[in-house]
Structure formats: C-alpha cells, structure tokens
Amino acid sequence: MVFYTLTRGKKRVSVKVLDRYRKGKYMNVSDIGIDLGTASILIYVRGKGVVLKEPSVVAYDRDADKIRAIGDEARIMLSRTTGNIVAIRPLKNGIIADYAVTEQMLKYFIQKATGRLSFRKPRISICVPSNVTEVEKKAVEDATYQAGAREVLTVPEPIAAAIGAGIDISRPCGKMIVDIGAGTSETAILSLDGIVVDHTINVAGDNFDEAIMKYARVEHNLIIGERAAEDIKIHVGTAIERPEQKIMEVKGRDLGTGLPKTVRITSEDVREALKETTGQIVEAVHSVLEKTPPELAADIVERGIVLTGGGALLDGMEELIEEKTGINTVTAEEPVAAVAIGTGTYAELTAHNNRLEG
C-alpha cells in the first residue's frame, strides 16, 4: 500500500494513492493528467490509467498553410510524403517552442482521450520542468485552457515522476528521483511534498539518438535517420560494458556515393557513442548529491535512487549510475508512464482535498 500526503495551506490530508484513486473513488470523471513530453504526449484518465501515448509531432502543409495530421497519424503521413508536408515538433526541452501548434495538438489529444462528445470541459493537471520560468509555465497553462480545460494545475515533473513511481514523498526523509525523458533529464531530492534540491540538463533520450547518428556518420560514413537510431538504441544500445556483444545490421545512405549501404554495429560501438551523454547524466546526479543536506543524503544511501522516463530503459543505465555513485539504483515499474500517472494522481489528490476543505 502506498501513501501520499497532499499539503494545501496548513492542512495535510493522507490518502491511499495507487489503489483507491486509480479506482476512481474520489475524482470527477473529467479530470485527466498530461505528460507534455518533447517526443511523446501521454494522457492519464482516472479509473482507466494511461489511455493515450502518441508522438508530439504535427504534419504541416506549407503550401496550404495548415495542419494535416497530429500524433501517430502525422508520423505515418510524414513517412510517406515529401516536399510540402513537413514535421513540426512544437515542444523543446519540455517547454513550448510553438504556442499555436501546441494548442492545436493539445486540443486534438484531449478530445481523443476524453471523447469528442464530452459535454463538460476537463479539469487538467499538466507537468512542467522543475526549472521552468513563470513565463514558460504561463504559456503551458494558457495553451491548456485554450485547448479546452476548465481548470489547469501545473505539476513539477520530478514530483509527478515520484508519485507515478509509487514513492511516498510526504514523509520527512529524502527520496531521489532521476527522470530521463526525451528532451531533458531531471534529478531531484524530494521530502515533505516538495523539492529540496534539483538539477535539470538538456541531455536525454533525443541526445542518445543524435549521438548514434553522429557515430554512424563519422565511423561508417553512413547517414541514418532518427527512427533507425532509435531502433539501434533499443536493440543493441547499452550504457555499460557487457561480456556478450549484440550485433545489428543497419541500413542507411553512404555519405560519399549517396547509395544504399549496410553496416554492422555492436553494442560496444553504441556504448562508446553514448559515453559522453550518459556521462553527463551521471554528472547531474553527482551534482545533486553534492548539494543534498547530510541528513537527507543518508536517507538516499539507505533508500536508493529511482529512475523514470524512457531514457531509463537504456540497457545498463541503472547499473552505470549505481557504479558511479555507490548507491543502489532501480528503475520504476512503469518508467515511461510514471510522469503521466503521477500528474493524473496529483489532480485526483487535489480534487479530493478541495472537497474536504469545502
């Protein structure tokens, strides 16, 4: 049983989170949580869990000056068309880079998740990076309202990730979360419902893909796309040395001749390619540990580090962090969905607490 305490003003209300709220005993059915990711959007609905996971990409027709498709449909369209149809990724490093496109994308996903015939506007909680500025946070709130929300709550990403991972952050002891997304990696020490120390770097899953594409270009004179780089990362990617090597044949275009070409890439090749980026994440973890108060640092040594986010799925990532810090490191049960689950759960807790205060 996991407990979490939500604080509003001077009141603290303890509730059983991951069983009672997921069953939807307290929350209005229209409340949802959104993980506004650089690469993917995830939407959590009370009583249903994560109901939507689609790429945060839009297919834009430059000639007609209009959006042709969003999410999965956009990815399919972009793989089959050229020229006037281009990809727009309206989110960068966890914040809005294109406001108008983000608004349209959010409206589409919210309608898809809640049903187009829904008569009541949803109450939405949405995650933001812990280092977000007030201007950037306001942009997220405004876009969410314009997309159809009746009320908007912003949730710091480390808090959402921790709640979604089943961590009780209400007690006066330190908990450490490392959320490795697509655009950013956030490391934080949490205690008493808040963030004590945190550090965000713009190095994450997308940088893994870029490093693999660079390796293929430099070492093999081969040009590959993002999808191919992601496949390599998933199938033979690793952050640590393994006694047994995995091998993958990779197809791309020869940089010199422009003709199709196939090369063999090993897991050790990918480890070397990713060494700099994984090293930066480890450095961020070290940076937070160095700034952690001694009492909370002792708690971290005892309780360990929890990884969330898609980047946590890179083979050997938890072993690398454990090796470099000397602290037991584990990956959350649902690392990719943790932020969405935590964001939605936060909304549920807030809704319940509002009723108690009322």
Image: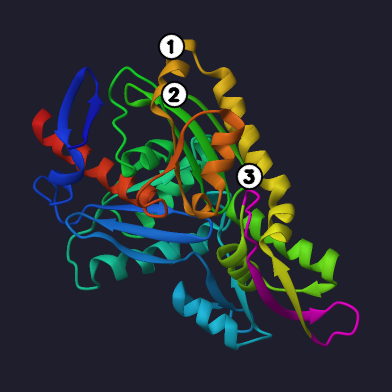
Residue 6: image quadrant is: top left
The residue nearer to you, when weighing 219 against 183, is 219
The residue nearer to you, when weighing 33 against 211, is 211
Q: In this view, does 103 lie above or below 251?
A: above
- Secondary element at tag 2: helix
**Amino acid under label 1?**
Glu
Q: Nearer the viewer, mark 3 or mark 2?
A: 2
Give the label on residue 188, or none: none
Residue 217 image position (x, y, % from top left): 81, 68
Q: Is residue 60 above or below residue 53?
A: below
Give the label on residue 300, or none: 2
Instruction: Identify the residue shown where x is 38% and y is 69%.
Output: 108
**Amino acid under label 3?**
Asn
Disc 1 marks which residue?
A: 295
- Residue that lies at the very extreme toward the right in this rendered image: 256
Give the label on residue 202, or none: 3
Q: In this view, does 121 lie above or below 319?
A: below
Residue 301: image quadrant is: top left
Tell me where the magenta segment starts and ends, as one range. 239-260
Instruction: Residue 198: say if magenta.
Output: no
Residue 303 image position (x, y, % from top left): 39, 27
User: Which of the two discs, 1 and 3, labels the residue nearer the N terminus?
Assistant: 3
**Amino acid under label 2?**
Ile
Q: Label 1 to label 3, Cα distance in Å? A: 29 Å
| Residue density around tag 1, few if under 14, some if 14–19, many if 20 or more, within 10 Å | few
Image quadrant occupied by the N terminus: top left
User: Which of the two discs, 3 and 2, labels the residue nearer the N terminus?
Assistant: 3
- Residue that lies at the very extreme toward the top in this rendered image: 294
| Residue density around tag 3, few if under 14, some if 14–19, many if 20 or more, within 10 Å | some
Q: Label 2 to label 1, Cα distance in Å? A: 9 Å
Q: Is residue 353 above or below residue 174?
A: below
